[in-house]
Image (tube, helix red, strand yellow):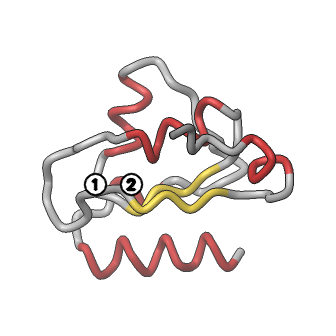
Amino acid sequence: MHTNREDFHKETFLTIVAETLFEDIGIFLTEKILKPLWNLHPFIVVSAPYTLKRLHELGFKTFHPFIDESYDDCLSNQERFLLIEKEIKK
């Protein structure tokens, strides 16, 4: 089943990607992060620290400085979640 709905991306400003891991240090990238990447759609990823850093290492570009991605460097789960929440509300 094809679940990459291009129309969803055309009708919205931002994708909030809830990846599989949040509290672990390990990075586990899934198809969830690929959907906004395929559609060149701005996103915030709710995931383990350094997920965006790993995407950059793989050659992907994200939406900094339009989205403050400093949450990606935060090791505290609680603080990272609060930074993500703040950026979503912005």
Front residue of 13 and 57 = 13
Local crowd size for mark 1, using a 10 Å CA cut-off: few (<14), some (14–19), many (≥20): many
Q: Position of residue 56 (x, y in %)?
A: 44, 28
Name the residue rendered at 49%, 36% in the picture: 34
Report the side of 88 relative to 90 (left or right).
Answer: left
Name the residue rendered at 25%, 74% in the picture: 77
Residue type, mark 2 in image: Asp
Name the residue rendered at 42%, 62% in the picture: 18
Name the residue rendered at 61%, 41% in the picture: 4
Q: Position of residue 35 (x, y in %)?
A: 56, 40
Q: Position of residue 3 (x, y in %)?
A: 57, 44
- What residue is shown with label 1? 49
- What residue is shown with label 2? 72
Residue 66 in the image: above or below residue 71: above
Task: Give SS at disc 2.
Answer: helix
Residue type, mark 1 in image: Pro
Name the quadrant of the C terminus.
bottom right
Q: Position of residue 61 (x, y in %)?
A: 57, 28
